[in-house]
Image (cartoon, rainbow, N blue to C red):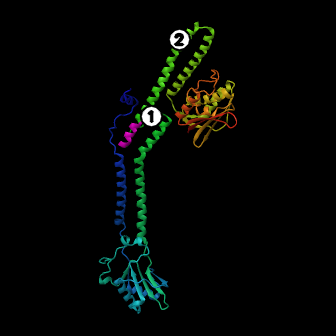
Amino acid sequence: MRDEKGTAGKIGLPMRRSPQRSWPMFLRIFVLGLTTVLLVQILNFAIVLLMPPPRPQIFTANRVAAVARTGRDPAGQLKVEIATGPPQPTDNPRDGRLAESIAADLGLPRTKVTVETERSAMPLFAGPLRPPLPLGMGRSGHVPQSFDNALFGPFVVSIEMPNGRWRVIRPTHTTIGPWRMRIVLWFLVAMVVAAAVAWVMARRVVRPIGLFAAAAERLGRDPRAEPLPIVGPPEIAEAATAFNLMQERLNRYVEDRTTLIAAVAHDLRTPLMRLSLRLEKAPEDIRAASEGDIQEMSQRIGSAMAFVRDMTRHVRRQRLDLRSLAESVADDFADRGDAVALHPGEPLALEGDAPSLKALLANLVGNAVKYAGHAEVEVRRENGVAIVEVSDSGPGMAPADLARAFEPFFRAEQSRNRDTGGSGLGLASVRAVARAHGGDATIENRPGVGLLARVTLPI
């Protein structure tokens, strides 16, 4: 078993945490929440300093009585309405004294006038958001004598008219005045500022997680991709280290198994050579049959070693035109006299390894030409992926064979003829190349007759 420390050091994976100090993620989230709350509190404190509440308008009982006589307020600060129903009675002693003062000024009985103070059409703006009373005045109803004849804040004065209706007098602005509108606007500004700061800080907190997810997706497309950089909070750094070790172990596992197959295939050539030499003294009929088997075994060993060599070689990804590769493959087969047709279409660029993708196309086209005598190739873009379809009008495959078509050394042709059966590694190589590029390969019978091989590759 290899030394993991030495192997990790060979590929540049740090086995220990980076000496660079970084805040833990839970502390970053705590600081984010605390900073946002403090920012909101600072903005709220700024409201108190920059926008002190205004002094309320004070109306005397004499002014209310004058407005009741004329039916309008020249200053526009009081509005007069007509109501059909009687007002609700009040038990506030100060309201009673105000009603008596207004009734005496108008020369009406006390029962004809009703005063209701501290009533707001919008309870949301009552209580803490209500403008303060003048200095020295409380809200319990006990007020100094100098304010006993004054009305302020939300109030309603109802005066019964001779026709049985009621003249209602109230302040023009009792709910959302300019001061309260400024508070609402300031609140919206504070929300926008706090949301922007929280958005920026949250993006910085979750950025390492996004990089981690991108690395996991890249590993699925290319197991030999570069290791994940060890950056970010300690939790992310530890996860990245474990991720890199997992990637290294997976690559080592695959390489060990591939090396074993290559070693076995290589070592089998020596006993096959000895068998060939010994068969020279064998009878003619036995020698002819045995030489055929030895030749088939040699071909299989050669195919296995070529397959292993293709899967283990260093892949260099670059931007390429998939349609140009398909045209090159189709021209190669056409030069040999094979019937291969490539459907027209637009160029299709993607990141990939040109030799591997060209071998993939050659395998698919070669199978179609071998078993059907012709091949039709179509390359197109669909739903953000590149699709390569190779179809023919040959005999097709049995449904049971379709499920095993991509297994190594599986050949659907039951005759096992060396000239037509192949080694059984062509489709296995096709799927391996497609999955190494983050795609996949499938094969199915066409409606009617023939086969359709489809390869999907991410763009």
Mark positioned earlier in the residue sequence (2 or 1)? 1
The residue that label 2 is drawn on is 274
Q: Is residue 229 visible?
A: no
Whether residue 352 is situated above or below residue 337 in the rendered picture: below
Residue at the image position 63 percent from the left and 10 percent from the top = 285
Q: Which residues are magenta?
A: 233-243
Residue at the image position 34 percent from the left and 66 percent from the top = 48
Q: Nearer the viewer, residue 86 or 32?
A: 86
Task: Using residue 354 as the reference point, say whether residue 245 is left or right of it.
Answer: left
The residue that label 1 is drawn on is 226
Is residue 210 found inside the magenta-colored segment of the image?
Answer: no
Task: Using residue 228 as the reference point, say whether residue 421 is left or right of it.
Answer: right
- The x and y percentages for residue 88 are 42, 83
| Amino acid type at mark 2 | Arg
Residue at the image position 46 percent from the left and 39 percent from the top = 216
Mark 1 residue element: loop
